[in-house]
Amino acid sequence: MSGASTRLQKLFEGHRLTPTQRRIAQCLVRRAGDAPFLSSVELAELAGVSQPSVTRFAVALGFDGYPGLRRHLREHGPTGTEDAGPPAGNSYQQAIHAEIENLRMLAAQLADPVPVAEAGALLAASRPLPVLGLRAASAQARGFAYFAAKVHPDVRLLDEGGTMLADRIDAAVRAGASALLCFALPRHPREVAAALDQARTAGLRVVTVADSAFAPVAAGGDILLPAAVGTGLAFDTACAPMLLGRALLEAICDQLPEAQARLEEFDARATERGLFLE
């Protein structure tokens, strides 16, 4: 994460923000280089909110109003070319450059490996391990569960909503689950928030891979691992959440002494069955 983005993230953390205010915060983090120079009208347009919402956001952060927030951003803003604007190019190239920046932010975030290691230990110890991801996040959950099942003895994929979702969470709890992994990407389904509330009430520790530290499905007791999504195309791109999921898998493998033996056993059986072309 760039220096300006990190400073903004720390400024917003610890404040109880409404969904609209989280949207403004996310916009400022994405536009960290421009943030000190945006008027309240410009910020409102970029975030897709009303101008009074921007004022209320600044007050929620402890400032008298938006001018006070902008003055703070200018006094603690970037220097030099720390946050240069997006590279030139067509819309496809710009989307890819933005996604590369998301990966750079994730790499900087993982300079502190402790949160991922702690999450890996929790998830590795859970028997079974429920993995939740609905709608846009279902692909992330399914990919994670596919690989996790190669090293973890009991992975339960929860990628469909509806009335059965609560039953499946209850079943996981009865079977001995101690933690749940959730992939939460925009737009955030109400069902995800309800499912996570149910899991927390049942005593499960929740690890959430989300698009932002301000994701509306997160709660105070969760381990929240943010990874930004790309928004430059008609549909969001999620390279950083996918890669963060793979890092979590690595952390889980580190906690499972039998992981390498399981992988070698799978490879041997795959060779015997001629499972793959190569």
Image (tube, rainbow, N blue to C red):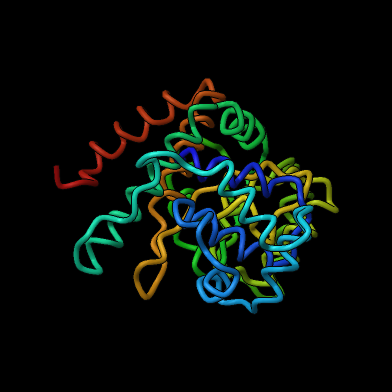
The residue lying at 76 percent from left, 51 percent from top is: 15
The residue lying at 64 percent from left, 29 percent from top is: 118
The residue lying at 56 percent from left, 48 percent from top is: 74
> Which quadrant holds the C terminus?
top left
- Of residues 37 and 130, the one nearer the viewer is 37
> Can you say whether 146 is above or below 259 in the image?
below
> Can you say whether 20 is above or below 68 in the image?
below
Q: Position of residue 151 (x, y in %)?
A: 48, 34
Does residue 171 appear left or right of residue 102 in this picture?
A: right
The residue lying at 78 percent from left, 47 percent from top is: 220
- Of residues 162 and 45, the one nearer the viewer is 45
Q: Position of residue 115 (x, y in %)?
A: 61, 32
Q: Residue reaching furthest top?
A: 257
Q: Residue reaching furthest left?
A: 278
Does residue 89 appear left or right of residue 213 in this picture?
A: left
Count the labels in the image: 0
Q: Position of residue 110 (x, y in %)?
A: 49, 32
Q: Position of residue 193 (x, y in %)?
A: 72, 64
Q: Locate residue 234: give its quadrant.
A: bottom left
Q: Locate residue 154: give its quadrant.
A: top right
